[in-house]
Image (spheres, rainbow, N blue to C red):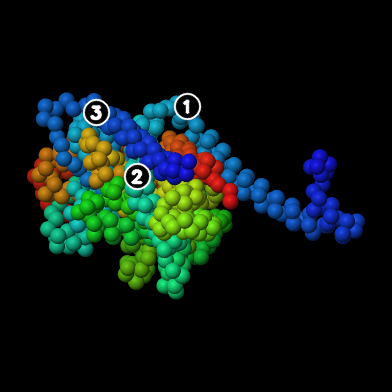
Amino acid sequence: MAIAAKGPRTSDVVAQQLRGRSTDVKGIIFQAALLFALLLSLLILLVLIADVARGGLGVFQERGGEFLRGRLTVVSPTTAGVGQGIVGSLLLLIFVVLMAFPVGVAAAIYLEEYASDTRFNRFIDVNIRNLAGVPSIVYGLLGLVIFVQVLAPLTGGKTVMAGGLTLAILVLPIVIITSMEALRAVPDSIREAGFGVGATRWEVIRSHVLPAAAPGILTGTVLSISRAIGETAPLLVVGATTGLLATGGRGFFESFREGYTALPVVVFRWTSLPNEDFRALTSAAIIVLLIMTLSANAIAIILRNRYERKW
Amino acid sequence: MTNTRDKVWLKTLLVALALALVGAACADASSDTDSGGGGGDSEALSGEVVVSGSSTVEPISVAVGEKFIAENPEVAVKIDGPGTSDGFELFCDGQTDISDASRPIDPEEVEVCEKNGIEFIELKVAIDGLSVITSVNNSEVDCLDFHDLYALLGPESEGFESWSDADDLAEEIGAGHAPYPDVPLDVTAPGEESGTFDSFGEIVMEDIAYEERKIKEDDPVIRPDYQASANDNVIIEGISGSDTSLGWVGYAFYQSNDETVKALPIAEEGDDCVEPNPETISSGDYPIARDLFIYVKTESADRPEVQAFVDLYLSEEGIASVSEVGYVDLATEDLEETRGVWESQETGSREG
């Protein structure tokens, strides 16, 4: 009702009447503390963004698209750019998408829909959750041994392929967990209805469970992409290039087995250079990285809203 | 209805993937055209040059590399700088053609190289001075010698919180500029992993610590209790943040921050304090300087693209990169010597 919407909340009114006239001092303090916590975290975020914007926007005004296409370098701030960083990050993501998504979703389907609730399966489940919390540098070391050294004949050593596969392994547990949650959120009645009309388990999963879980799976996987975009430590370990990179005019698919660099690695390297001009470039590169991450998040939100179903 | 709905999410995924691929391909193509343009030579070189090693030397190699790819767009060049030691590990494993180094290769590393059949040519390319720095607002101190630095930063100074805490030690070892002011001593400097840390300890501390003070050989020669950072810009921040700070960085970092930090003139002994600048570092008058090297694998040096890269490195055009990126040029006769070594393809290390 109109009165309720304008005045104090019904719950507050009821609480007030039950308690009598005394004001709830502790309650007010608690509320203030909560508000303070919220404002503090927002303030820190704002300061960060303002600082980066102040340093980096000038670069876009001056150099514009040329900065977005420029090559990686540590010596000449006037020609340095993030072109190779953006390309490298996108190439890495191709491997993340191609590797982590199918494998992760398949593993989640098995664990949720097929695996019976044995002690062994619960053990696997718990360990996947633990893997999601393992520091990224550990995955970097794993990638160095497996993809850079052992599988060198396939990946060609410190290449995009090795870096991409390392990131794929890194986000795999996250993909599995979010997909499992999404599958679990599909009501059992949907499955039972499918079985009830004589569908096989695979048919039920393919035409009912998966479509229903798709928004959740997509959200989780896209969010894991934005995690992968921002990772620096494992890439430094598996050999992303920090200084100079020239492919010598090789083609797109050949570049899978070439050296590479990535946006966060560029940011990392540029912060430790003596030349002051690189500080503005670093801020500008951070802005590009933020935009890439935020677009991935935005895609996740749009997909979720687009396909969400209410039960 | 359900049928179309089923496929929608799959299609969305495929479209997103396709977009990513197209985007990557386009951006790739545009970055490649940047490197074109040059190529006046009649025979175009191809192949690849892989350089790794010291992050201090990396900018010089990158500057040379930029000039190189402008002339040779067909050659793939990859340069990075994980550190001198990491660089030698890759180099002696045969993974790189050229290794940048901010110190000479050490005997253990030579052994690994020999075991793997890697021969190399050692080329000295530049000099880097280490600047002892403090805040521009510090007017209390205007000169320090090696014994002063030992008293303030050496292993026996652990726990000193004020400059004057070092007075007794300074007197005992005969430091030239004690007593020091009674002001807080805020030390910010490179961490142990850095070549700059090693060089400072070797040049300034080791003789005093091991010979005069009889510290056990191989014990650390720099106090452990200070703000350490691997990022030189963080060190500059720390130094400018306190009026009575003390620390050290490579000369290039001091040079690009000389409004916020000042370099203290240094004497090896007594009062002949010398300020770091290109002349004093190049002539050897400034006492804390180190040589910067590149190591070229002999096998790679036979490949035309690597040969062309090193030729350019040592040419007038290439070696100008040294001062362009803030390091100090070799004296003319040293440069001639380096060129001689390259021409005669003399292998092995000639340093210590």
The amino acid on which the numbered mark 3 sits, given as a three-letter code, is Gly
Q: Chain of mark 1?
A: A
Q: Chain of mark 3?
A: B
Asked if labels 1 and 3 share a chain, the reply is no
Circle on res. A94? 2
Q: Secondary structure at mark 3?
A: loop
Q: Which residue sits at x=41%, y=54%?
A: A203
Query: Which of the 4 quarters of the picture holds residue B70?
Result: top left
CA–CA distance in space, label 1 to label 3: 26 Å
CA–CA distance in space, label 2 to label 1: 31 Å
Choose between A135 and B293: the one closer to the eye: A135
Query: Which of the 4 quarters of the picture holds residue B270?
Result: bottom left
Q: Residue furthest bottom?
A: A119
Circle on res. A61? 1
Q: Secondary structure at mark 2?
A: helix
Q: Dot 2, crowdedness within 10 Å: few (<14), some or many (≥20)?
A: many
Q: Dot 1, crowdedness within 10 Å: few (<14), some or many (≥20)?
A: few
The amino acid on which the numbered mark 1 sits, given as a three-letter code, is Gln
The reply to whether dot 2 and dot 1 touch (C-beta < 8 Å) is: no
